[in-house]
Amino acid sequence: MEITETVHEPLRREFRITVGVRDLDAKLATRLEGIKDQVNLKGFRPGKVPVAHLRKTYGKSMMGEIVQEAVAEYSQKAVDERSLRPAMSPQIQMVSPFEQVIAGSEDLIFTMGIDLMPDFKLAELSSIALMRPVAEVSDENVMDSLKRLAAQQRTYEPKGDDATAVDGDQLLIDFVGKIDGVPFEGGTADNAALVIGSGSFIPGFEDQLKGAKAGEAKTVSVTFPGDYPSANLAGKFAVFDVTVKEVRRGLEAEVDDSLATKLGLESLDKLREAAQSQLMAEFARASRAHLKRALLDALDTSHSFELPPGMVEAEFKQIWAQVEQDIKSGNLADEDKAKSEDELREEFRRIAERRVRLGLVLSEFGRVNKVEVTQEEMNRAVVAQARQYPGQEKRIFEIYRNNPDAVAQLRAPIFEDKVVDFLCGQVKITDKQVSREDLFKDPDDLAKILNAN
């Protein structure tokens, strides 16, 4: 085994690592010898299968496992021998052909690049003072919530043949969607119920059906959003032939015990308590989100140090890919539309630098203060993910069981939230009473209000 350092920079190291064929073969021989007495193959007595036959039967699959283990082992060895502190997982690139390595005809040669944690001093938490916006759940808030629940339980009745559709009406429609004159998959439906103003169809679809009457045929032209879930439809112009079969008016449900019963509760008082509890939880989440934003802003301004260039570049590429998609689909924010590409690149690179800086700061605070994500917390997170895909739970569990990168992605936000909670317990926090409307404003707009007071 040979480890050669090829790049030595303050926050970056790269290595070329070679593991000889003989070393790999010795590992394979040891593993085959270890299973010899456990294998039962047709034509051989238990424990009497020749190692040569085991090599022929299992050698390739076992060598694949050995190669993966060797990459992990010797990558870690390069890090440990030099007492390096990685800032992120190493980037591995195979040099020798994988098939020839597992066939035993070539040495295992791969490169490893790794960004290093910069040395920096963590800010004194006692010097950070934050303002946390809080709002009380009023009786009016609870009643508004109950009215929304009642609206969701409304029923519909026909308005009559000559009635025209207005906001809030439900239409029963048949439609056929076409792109370039050709019907597309998923673009056809019969007896579809659509509430005008619900925003449940493609933007612009519902507006073109206002004023429609039962029995009327309409042509609706829309452009699918650039971020539409079906990639083959995103950004495409489509024409829908729509037949309106019926126009229905909504009948509001009363806010009473019968509404509570429909929702599975025994009385209106119980429903009111449930609505209040839900609103309190929503207010608390919004309050915490603003506090977290203020904390991250304070940490960002309190730390200045050189950033690993590889991490910044990787983060920027991820951000810029989304920006390019937004430009292509016309979804770029209004304030960014007048900016040149160079201006946008500079702005989003600063965002990438902020994210990397804060990630490193939070990671270091977590390490120093021994903040850890428990296995129980990970198990709960995996179960929560699986519940989002009914019928596919087993596949989701397998993904997280066999994919370390998926586990790392699931762990990262849990770790971040735990570090944020720890830090919020160390800094000075002053609660500031605000209205419900202000609590749910954009963080920048709310910050202006808090600072003005």
Image (spheres, grey):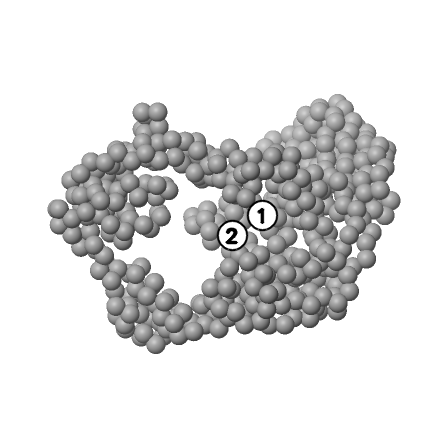
Could you say whether the residue bearing mark 2 is in a helix, strand or loop? helix
Q: Residue at x 61, y 54 (%)?
A: 413
Q: Position of residue 239 (x, y in %)?
A: 31, 31
Q: Residue at x 69, y 65 (%)?
A: 423
Q: Position of residue 51 (x, y in %)?
A: 72, 32
**Number of numbered discs:** 2
Is residue 224 visible in the rendered structure shown here? yes
- Residue 386 vs 429, above or below: the answer is above
- Residue 161 vs 255, above or below: the answer is above
Quadrant (top left/top right/bottom left/bottom right) for the N terminus: top right
Report whether 373 appears left or right of 73. Answer: left
Mark identifier at residue 400? 1
Residue placed under numbered mark 2 in the picture: 385
Mark 2 Cα-neighbour bin, 10 Å: few <14, some 14–19, many ≥20: some
- Residue 118 vs 98, above or below: the answer is below
Is residue 274 visible in the rendered structure shown here? no
Amino acid type of the residue tagged 1 in the rendering: Tyr
Q: Quadrant of residue 32?
A: top right
- Circles 2 and 1, Cβ within 8 Å, touching? The answer is yes
